[in-house]
Image (cartoon, rainbow, N blue to C red):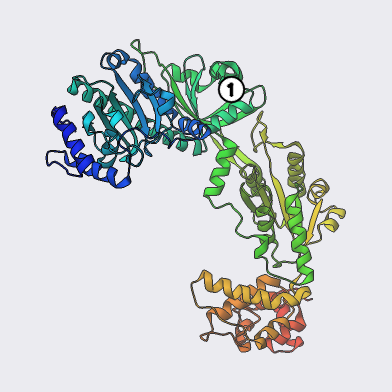
Amino acid sequence: MIREHRSREKLENYYKKFVQEGVLDPNVHPWVAESWRKSRELGVGTEKMDTSHRLAPEAFRALQAKHKNAIDYLARLSDGIREFFQEYNLSLLLIDADCVVLKSYSLPFYQMTPGEIEGVRVGIEEVGTSSISVAYEHQTPFWMFGPEMWVGECQLGDACSAPVKIGGACEYIITLVSMEQMQLPQDAVIALLLTMKSALEAHLSEAVHRKAEEAILDATNFAVYHVLPGGEVAYTNRLGKERLTRIGAKQEHETGKRLNLNDVIMNYQHTPISKGFRGIPSYNQEVTWITPVKTYEDITTVVPLERDEEQNVKSVVVVSMPIEDLRTLVAHAAGYTAKYSLNSMVGSGDAFASVREKAARVARNKHHVLIQGEAGTGKQRMAHGIHQASGRAAGPLIALRCGDATPELLEQELFGIVQGSDVSHQGRLELASGGTLFLDEIEKMPKPIADELAEALRKGTMHRLGEKGVERTIDVRIIAACDSDLKRLTERGLFSKAFYEIISKSVIRVPSLRSRREDIPELARHIISELAEQHQMPRKSLPDATIDVLKGYDWPGNIKQMQSVLEYAFFNTKEDFIAPEGINLMGDVKPDNKWKEDRDVFLKAWQAAGGNVSRLANLLNVSRVTLYRYLKKYHLEKK
């Protein structure tokens, strides 16, 4: 606040009258009067400035380091106007939001050396009324005449303080103090202070924005470089620094000069960066970077920036992402992550608990894994759990069912394919790099493909079908699942021996449901609970009599079959419990006469019985002789 010059003698009288008699003259500025009252209430001494409220040296050094940016910037500003300070015997202070003096510039303040005042708290509680306390209280610049200061030894000269605000909050206060009773060019001093305030606010705001931008860039999955002519890197984000360090680039503090791409990229002159300096941008281009350590393949964008007077490009921005990282990002975006943990696999019986414990141990090693067990025992969920418990949990989990495609399509799905010069598709093996590839029904993978896969895993490299001269690095863990005895198939020459040797170092055998009947009650209630939660419906209980029905059945289709049976019962029971009669062991196949006319209905019942004639006869309540006739009719194999 700019105030007209006041008579020093009158101000001194106002001050003495209040200090000695407690009487406030109406001509005292309202903000000063308010501050005087508060200073009196706080019991602040009026003779000598209290500097006892000082930070310990170590704490003060830490505080100065925290505010180094503001301290250094204000030092550069004050250097240019030092002569003005000396002419009018002015001192400049930088004070933080807690009213601690961070730095004293130019001349001594309050006839104290910088060392005496720095680190001291100068709020109203400590030194009473001052331009600092009023500017802090009202969050606006304020000029205070010497006789208005609360402490007598501070009344020799005038002072002006201004809050420095960043994002609407007061971060600092800057103060100019005159040490002599002399006529100051008030307008010039205030203009100088406000100029310094605005400059510091702009500088600090820009620093905040720059810090935010750097945080955003550091959080991205892209390496970002600002490159000058000759390959010098003016700026790079965190990922860019990490990549340059990995390939042998020396940090600036080690060499005394900026990182230079020419030093570490052997084919630098043949990359899109060179084109960028010729004014030619590149967008999402697949680029090979040859370094002394390894060869990288990236998706790269290069954008030329400002030009000089002769239209030469002065710098370019390079945004680059390793193709392997892009694959991982796409995999996560597409939901290629584990949906189940090992803890989600229900069962507290000894048979299953030991299998789950083994799976947890296997998850932590680096071997490929073979999961064996009958259909429907939960091998896929086990694979998800192993991936999630492994060191590859952050990578993708890619699945491929080997029995769903012809050998030609399976090979393409696995290795990828190049179709012409512009069309190239990656396979599941590349997509899973850095993570896990789950191969279900592995016994159905043809031997030639399995042999090729074994060789790729052994070498750690592969190429897409139809691709020549390009070896792509892979880093993948295989989890294979098999319903059959894979060892026996291998011994009979029906499965690749090389691939079996790779995946059989860690074998997990998932027990059938009939061999772990003690887990059926827990499993059944867990399935019902999952259904209720998934479909946002009330839960339904399973009485003991219903549990007895479930435990008395052999479950040839294992957990998958029980899931189907309970799902049918859950949606077709109106009560809040599922009675024994609500359990149809054939799932959605009703024991009526439709199976006699509809092969699909009979086939479902046949599968529910596990291909066992006696069991199906009991389910359909017919004789074995009748069933034999329909088995022959529908061309089904007897067991």
Residue 216 drawn above or below residue 265 = below
Image quarter hosting the N terminus: top left
Please give left or right for residue 92 compared with residue 68 in the image.
Answer: left
Of the pair 525 and 604, the residue shown nearer to us? 525
Residue topped by disc 1? 251
View extreme (top): residue:
310
| Percent coordinates x, y for residue 22 in the rendering | 20, 44
The three-letter code of the residue at mark 1 reads Gln
Q: Is residue 270 visible?
A: yes
| Percent coordinates x, y for residue 488 in the rendering | 85, 58
Q: Secondary structure at mark 1?
A: loop
| Percent coordinates x, y for residue 149 in the rendering | 25, 33
Residue 51 drawn above or below residue 271 = below
Which quadrant of the view contains residue 167? top left
| Percent coordinates x, y for residue 141 in the rendering | 24, 33
View extreme (right): residue:
491
